[in-house]
Image (spheres, rainbow, N blue to C red):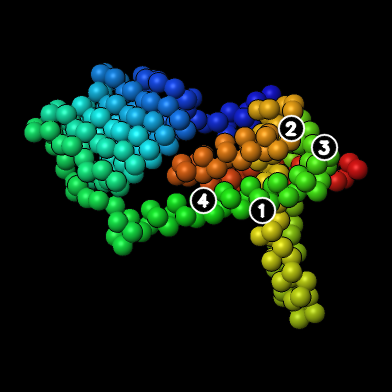
Amino acid sequence: MKRIAFIALLLLCWALPGTASAAAKPKVRIVIEGDVLVDRGQTTKDLYVADGDVTVRGKVDGDIVVGDGDVTIRGDVTGSVVTLGGTATLGRRAHVAGDLRYGKHKPLVTAGAKVDGDIKKIKPDDASGGAISFAVGVWVAVTVSMLVLGLILLALFGRAGDAVARVGRSKTLRAGLVGLLTVILIAVVGVLALITVIGIPLGATLLLLLLPLWAISYVTGSFIVGRMVKKTGGAILAFIIGLAIVRVLALVPFLGGLVALLTALVGLGSLVVAARAR
């Protein structure tokens, strides 16, 4: 039951690939690959599509962000529309309450369509364009770094990794609590050590240790997520699947930070529990 709850949290807002229509209840949609249709009479919240076309005949209560794909709007969008690699086409009944931003191809706006905000090309030197470029750069850098670190750890400690994953899968809640207590203990001891002159080196070392410890815990938690999805088979493939899930969810405001925190805590707790068991 704990394992199912953890998977459900990580997969919150996860959209299945393929052509799909939005459900009657509004919700955030994230699509890695595939087309999305919001038909007449339907409403969905923010749409984030990495590779696929988006057609809106109903209503999107939020923003639309598409990496590589075309966007066709014949309904209402209460937020902004951003197309990086495709073309946005607005029908005569389309209404975009926010901005219409584009990367490669200029939008096609039919007479009668309404855009309340600005229609602008994303440029690296724009404030918003620079922020987007910076955010994408950081996301890619973190993803690649975690991928390389995870592959190195699996190459060095493959068997230990599977043992830790078994702990994370079977004792998810306990691992998360142990991870949280471990972080609190290290932080408290580090701060207390800094108070005394003789303890400054120890305190500084403990606090500086939190960053690499977070990285190791994060990739460990990602591997655990991968093993929840792919219980058997190659460890590398399981890790890549888990990391892909966690890093895609990192794109969702607030939820991404929460998932990253839970992933790292469960990973750290699993490491501690598995080490104590051995």
Q: Residues within 10 Å of mark 1 (few under 14, many from 20)?
A: some
Which mark sits nearer the N-terminus, 1 or 2? 1
Q: Earlier in the sequence, mark 3 or mark 1?
A: 3
Discs 3, 2 touching: Cβ within 8 Å: no
Q: CA distance from mark 3 to mark 4?
A: 29 Å
Crowd around label 2: few <14 · some 14–19 · many ≥20 (10 Å)? few
User: Residue shown at 31%/41% (left/top)?
Assistant: 83
Q: Quadrant of residue 242?
A: top right
- Identified at 25% across, 18% down, the residue is 40
Q: Inspect the image, locate mark 1, and give the three-letter code of the amino acid beneath it.
A: Ala
Name the residue carrying label 2. Answer: 234
Which residue matches tag 4? 140
- Quadrant in the rendering for residue 260: top right
Estimate the x, y position of residue 134 in percent, counting from the top left: 43, 57
Which sits in the foreground, 69 or 247?
69
Q: Residues within 10 Å of mark 4 (few under 14, many from 20)?
A: few
Q: Which mark is residue 215?
A: 1
Q: CA distance from mark 1 to mark 2?
A: 22 Å
Horizontal and vertical percent position of residue 228: 68, 29
In space, the residues marked 4 and 2 are separated at their CA atoms by: 24 Å
